[in-house]
């Protein structure tokens, strides 16, 4: 049930701390300056993310290559200074324009373009000579030979310093797995997509410049220079039947390749002007993916009355030093302190009617703006309860970076709440099933809160679930958990979702 224990870990590599110097463990967050620290100022967070991303990459390479002496390996990795060079894979069916996009990106990013053709054309390489022989004889290159040739090319200085773009590689699931096994990790994968009818029409008009390798089209991209026009050639294998066969083979392979790159994949519609495709691709490859570096948590817990929000908030606050912000408690404290907001809230409390959103938001803003919330982060519960409140909170800049919905069936909530009792003498709270009073004398004087009657609970549950669908849609990255289980099991899921986000639905 749920998620395996390993999901709560930042990196599998951190399970072997004995082989890594202390500085690397500090960067990964396995050694923290104090219990519950999630990072400091925003500038510190940015530095932490960069350092951690670099370290995670290094640990990944350590696990893949498993060097006998890891220290020289790590020193060599750090001295390469190539953590931010392009490492891109561009895939797409025939006539989708992937070679053109790859060439434009390579020129714009000043990086190296690698294709099957360029790899087997390499001079002074026995592997390339062997690949050329296979290609001339069988019109293909064996997977192992192609990947070894690619590995040889990527180890060269220009690829290490300036990065690379793979045009149409990998071609099969087997090649993708071989690439991963060798520790070759792209940062961005682009898959171009277009209807087969469009691709067949495009392919029939394709022409190639034998001198430069540039691709042109008789309809869409005809060169103005007569000199170039005169030397253009029709590539082999672009008839309608041949294109349809290649498309069938591509579709059969691509559905098995793409699952290898779930977090770095961008699918772009190629049935639009080539320039538009290029700028979408360029925008994507210039973005950085999210790091697991420490951050300041701003956690929102949503759930019906009795779902355990208060307990989970207390556990998070205790373990990680977050500020526990209960909206209802804030309003009560404002009234007790007789503050200016408390005087505004008092009449609503006396009449037992809802406090207006604008007053709640002022009290909440005052608390979230305090230094401890800004520096240590917060866990908020009891607000927002509907879409309007969520919009107000968002418009004022209070955006949670983790949102959890705790789902609990009505029967369980009724059992949890209707059996609660309070001792009017000591103030101690009991539960007739889970925490019964110690003596019959105490039990005889226990009182039930009128707000915890079955009728009141049903009304509150109905109100929550009427609004919860809109709230879940508003917080698109929210994680929904089953709150009807042991509270410490729920806490483990919440903790895992903060450190390493879980799937959207957890059973």
Image: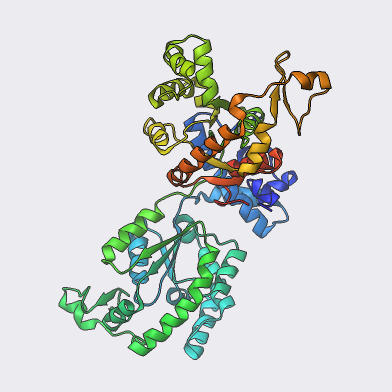
10 in relation to 386, above or below: below
Task: Tell me which corner region of the image, top left, top right, bottom left or bottom right, holds residue 145.
Answer: bottom right
Nearer to the camera, 261 or 476: 476
Residue 427 rendering spot, x and y as whole percentages? 70, 16
Residue 484 rendering spot, x and y as whole percentages? 66, 43
Nearer to the camera, 197 or 327: 327
Nearer to the camera, 455 or 7: 455
Regarding residue 246, the answer to whether it shows in the image is yes
Residue 404 rendering spot, x and y as whole percentages? 55, 41
- The residue that appears at 22% across and 79% down in the rendered structure is 218
412 in relation to 119, above or below: above
- The residue that appears at 46% across and 41% down in the rendered structure is 467
- The residue that appears at 28% across and 81% down in the rendered structure is 201
Residue 409 rendering spot, x and y as whole percentages? 61, 44
Task: Tell me which corner region of the image, top left, top right, bottom left or bottom right, holds residue 268.
Answer: bottom left
Side of 126 where 435 appears, left or right:
right
Side of 174 where 281 appears, left or right:
left
Q: Give the residue at the far top of this rendering.
A: 338
Regarding residue 500, the answer to whether it shows in the image is no
How many discs mark residues in the rendered view?
Answer: 0
Nearer to the camera, 99 or 456: 456
> What colour scheme has been applied to the protein in the rendered image?
rainbow
């Amino acid at each position: 049930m749920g998620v395996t224990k390993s999901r709560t870990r930042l990196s599998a590599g951190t399970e072997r701390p004995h082989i890594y110097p202390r500085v690397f463990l500090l960067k990964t967050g396995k050694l923290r300056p104090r219990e519950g620290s999630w990072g400091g100022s925003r500038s510190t967070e940015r530095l932490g993310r960069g350092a951690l991303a670099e370290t995670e990459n290094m640990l990944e390479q350590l696990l893949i290559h498993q060097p006998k002496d890891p220290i020289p390996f790590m020193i060599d990795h750090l001295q390469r200074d190539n953590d931010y060079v392009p490492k891109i894979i561009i895939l797409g069916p025939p006539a989708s324009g992937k070679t053109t996009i790859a060439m434009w990106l390579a020129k714009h990013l000043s990086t190296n373009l690698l294709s099957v053709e360029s790899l087997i054309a390499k001079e002074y390489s026995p592997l390339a000579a062997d690949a050329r022989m296979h290609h001339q004889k069988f019109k293909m290159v064996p997977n192992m030979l192609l990947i070894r040739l690619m590995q040889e090319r990527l180890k060269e200085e220009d690829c290490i310093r300036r990065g690379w773009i793979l045009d149409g590689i990998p071609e099969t699931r087997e090649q993708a797995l071989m690439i991963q096994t060798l520790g070759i990790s792209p940062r961005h994968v682009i898959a171009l997509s277009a209807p087969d009818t469009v691709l067949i029409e495009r392919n029939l008009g394709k022409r190639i410049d034998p001198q430069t390798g540039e691709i042109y089209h008789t309809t869409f991209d005809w060169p103005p220079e007569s000199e170039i026009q005169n030397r253009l050639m029709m590539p082999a294998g672009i008839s309608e039947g041949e294109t349809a066969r290649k498309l069938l083979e591509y579709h059969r392979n691509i559905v098995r390749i793409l699952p290898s790159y779930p977090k770095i994949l961008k699918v772009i519609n190629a049935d639009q002007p080539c320039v538009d495709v290029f700028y979408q691709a360029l925008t994507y490859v210039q973005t950085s993916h999210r790091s697991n570096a420490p951050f300041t948590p701003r956690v929102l817990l949503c759930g019906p009355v009795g779902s355990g929000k208060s307990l989970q908030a207390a556990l998070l606050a205790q373990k990680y030093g977050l500020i526990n912000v209960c909206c209802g408690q804030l309003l009560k404290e404002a009234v007790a302190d007789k503050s200016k907001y408390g005087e505004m809230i008092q009449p609503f409390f006396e009449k037992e009617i809802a406090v207006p959103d604008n007053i709640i938001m002022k009290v909440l803003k005052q608390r979230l703006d305090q230094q401890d919330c800004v520096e240590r982060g917060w866990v908020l519960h009891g607000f927002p309860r509907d879409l309007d409140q969520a919009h107000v909170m968002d418009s004022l800049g209070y955006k949670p970076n983790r949102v959890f919905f705790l789902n609990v069936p009505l029967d369980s909530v009724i059992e949890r709440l209707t059996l609660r009792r309070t001792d009017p003498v000591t103030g101690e709270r009991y539960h007739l099933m889970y925490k019964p009073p110690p003596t019959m004398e105490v039990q005889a004087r226990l009182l039930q809160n009128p707000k915890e009657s079955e009728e009141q609970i049903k009304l509150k549950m109905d109100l929550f679930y009427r609004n919860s669908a809109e709230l879940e849609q508003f917080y698109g990255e929210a994680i929904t958990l089953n709150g009807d289980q042991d509270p410490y099991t729920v806490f483990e899921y919440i903790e895992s979702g903060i450190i390493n986000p879980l799937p959207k639905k957890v059973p």
